[in-house]
Image (spheres, grey):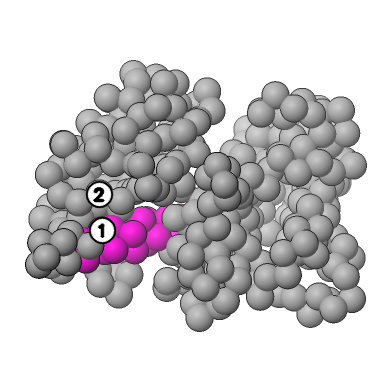
Amino acid sequence: MSHVAGVDIGGTKTSAALIGRGGEVGRTVTVPTPAADGPAAVLAAVADAVHRLGGDPAAVGVGSAGVIDPDSGYVLSATDAMPGWAGTDLRGGLHDLLGVPVAVENDVHAHALGEAWTGAATDTGTVLLVAAGTGIGGSLLIDGVVHHGARHVAGHVGHLAVPAAAGRPCTCGGRGHVEAVAAGPALHADYLAQGGHPAAGDLRAVAARAEQGDEIAVRTLERGATALGQALGGLANALDPDLVLVGGGVAGCGEAWWRPLRAAFTAELLPPLRGLDLAAGRLGTAAALVGAGRIGWEAAACATTCCLH
């Protein structure tokens, strides 16, 4: 066994990669996620991506959008971006299609596991990772083990209340949550609502305009980053981690975003935590693939042990 396959299932795209025993990332295949066509189509797309990798992977590890029960292998709940995804037997369905051991996990938990294996959180006891992108998710690792919570819902950092979001509707149906002001779509919408240049078609363009001195872009990023920094500082006070990592697409917005994020985070910390590090993830978009590969290797080892007994 020289490789397993690590898979990252998102609402718009699915990536698969060969992952070596030390977390090395090999051949990678990315395909659109046919979410609108239903769960069977998504599982078929994952299986196709794994087959296209070649290499006869010994097992498959999957990080998926949604609330995932890694013990049963089922998707417990999901957003409207994945219609019908809730209730899917993710592990069983992929095992039927691929014929190898399959392990499943939430995609942000997989992201954290990847950073803990070969990234910015190796040899770190307690790690809080936050992924800021289309939404805002989180994961708490304690000695390398994911804290799932009693209902596998732990990590929904985006649904913490912050003053800047007061009254704003959130994707979860609630109001006032940090995701409503600090996630990528919210930042882009805020920029345009404040009279930002209409040619800025996405958050990347807003970040570029901030670097060029666009005052509306700078204020937009500062407002969102400050709200997220306050939420992360409060979480750090409650959890006392060794390290806080931030990743996801929004983290690529440059110093116009990182500077207010760090300032708000530090201002929120209790005195004993003032030296706590807030750092960027090291693996980028490969993190969830590496973390999925890690649980894939665990599934391969378990299958071998079971066969020996």
Q: Which residue is mark 1?
A: 299
| Secondary structure of residue under mark 2 | strand
* Disc with the residue nearer the chain's start (2 vs 1): 2
x, y percentage for residue 260? 82, 59
Viewport quadrant of the N terminus: bottom left
Is residue 31 in view from this perspective? no
Does the residue at mark 2 contact the one at mark 1 (Cβ under 8 Å)?
Answer: yes
User: Does residue 294 show up magenta in the picture?
Assistant: yes
Please state the total of marks drawn on the protein image.
2
Residue projecting furthest to the top? 37
Q: Report how far apart the C-alphas of labels 2 and 1 lie in the structure.
A: 6 Å
Q: Residue at x 30, y 51 (%)?
A: 103
**213 or 110: nearer the viewer:** 110
- Please give the label number shown on residue 102: 2
Q: Residue at x 55, y 78 (%)?
A: 124
Decide: few, some or many residues near mark 2? Use Cα within 10 Å; few <14, some 14-19, many ≥20. many
Is residue 223 in view from this perspective? yes
Q: Amino acid at mark 2?
A: Val
Residue projecting furthest to the front? 309
Q: Residue at x 24, y 68 (%)?
A: 20
x, y percentage for residue 140? 59, 60
Stretch of the chain drawn in magenta: 284-301
